[in-house]
Image (cartoon, rainbow, N blue to C red):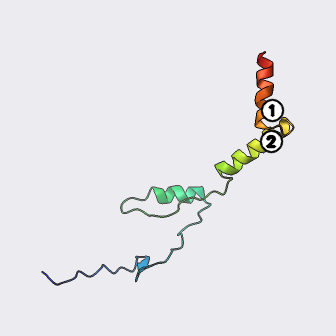
Amino acid sequence: MPGTRAKAASSTSSTRRNGIIRPRRSPHDVTDEIAAYKLANIDFPGVFGVFYENDRPTKNALEKKWIESSRAKVNNATDLELLQKTFDRMK
């Protein structure tokens, strides 16, 4: 009908109320891989959220470490010096 507004569904399971999103606590230990697989295998409607969290270095941190160790092997030579050494070997 014109002029009527539909009310938003109000559910006790909703984490969003009055425009504010409140994070929920995870129902399991997110560092437990077995519990994460059990949650992932629950049938409809399923569970949403973080199942498993593993603290490990990022790609950028690993790459930085790799570059630093490579530079140390060549006595911190610049890119130009490395390129020149490569050309000198080709002669």
Residue matched to label 1? 81
Q: Amino acid at mark 1?
A: Glu
Q: Amino acid at mark 2?
A: Ser
Secondary structure under the numbered disc 1 in the rendered image? helix
Q: In the visual, does 91 lie left or right of 32?
A: right
What residue lies at 30% left-to-right and 78% top-to-bottom? 9
Q: In the visual, does 12 lie left or right of 31?
A: left
Is the C terminus in the top left, top right, bottom left or bottom right quadrant?
A: top right
What residue lies at 39% left-to-right and 80% top-to-bottom? 12
Q: Is residue 91 above or below residue 22?
A: above
**Badge 1: few (under 14), some or many (20 or more) residues near its Cα, within 10 Å?**
few
Query: Which residue occupies the foreground of this view, 54 or 79?
Result: 79
Residue matched to label 2? 69
Q: In the visual, does 71 lie left or right of 48?
A: right
Query: Which residue occupies the foreground of this view, 22 or 69?
Result: 69
Label 1 or label 2, whichever lies nearer to me, is 1
Q: Position of residue 53 (x, y in %)?
A: 60, 59
Q: Is residue 23 above or below residue 48?
A: below
Mark 1 to mark 2 CA distance (whole Å): 17 Å
Q: Position of residue 83 (x, y in %)?
A: 76, 29
Sequence-first disc among 1 and 2: 2
Quarter of the image for residue 2 reads bottom left
What residue lies at 56% left-to-right and 67% top-to-bottom? 28
Secondary structure under the numbered disc 2 in the rendered image? helix
**Badge 2: few (under 14), some or many (20 or more) residues near its Cα, within 10 Å?**
few
